[in-house]
Image (spheres, rainbow, N blue to C red):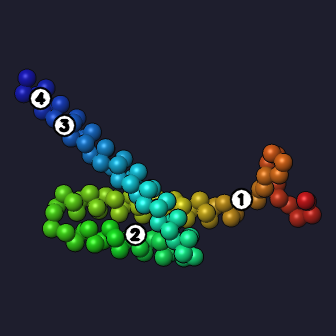
Amino acid sequence: MKNVILSMLIKMSRMDAQMKELTAQIEAQSLVVAALTLTVGKGGGLDEMVASINKSINSVLETPDAALQSDAELLLVKFHEQVELTRAVSKESDEIPTVVTGGDLTTDQPGQS
């Protein structure tokens, strides 16, 4: 019976960690959308937005609450993953030689319109 209880506790612990990670990812995405909206409205760029969010999260990391720091660190990691993903998609989309015209996907080659 002891092993069954320990197994259940281990499963619950793993589920808790996965839920925190998923929540942090969702919150990071929410931060990106909110900050992007504000930044674009002010005419700033991506670097300004990232710096603003980093500053906010880092201020939470300075608190003495260990649980809060752990969650903030996870949020910061997930935020940076989202920023890197956004930058990678942006870079790749600049290199893709296709355009959508009239519902058709065509190769954008010189001389074509």
* Residue 5: image tag: 4
Above or below, 41 against 100 in this view is: below
SS at circle 4:
helix
**In the figure, is residue 39 to the left or right of 77?**
right
The numbered mark, 1 or 4, whose residue comes first in the sequence reads 4
Kind of residue sitting beneath label 4: Ile
SS at circle 3:
helix
The numbered mark, 3 or 4, whose residue comes first in the sequence reads 4
**In the figure, is residue 26 to the left or right of 20?**
right
Q: Position of residue 27 (x, y in %)?
A: 38, 54
Residue 24 can be seen in this image: yes
Above or below, 6 against 105 in this view is: above
Kind of residue sitting beneath label 2: Ile
Q: Which quarter of the figure has residue 95? A: bottom right
The answer to whether the residues at label 2 and label 3 have Cβ atoms under 8 Å apart is no
**In the figure, is residue 66 to the left or right of 106?**
left
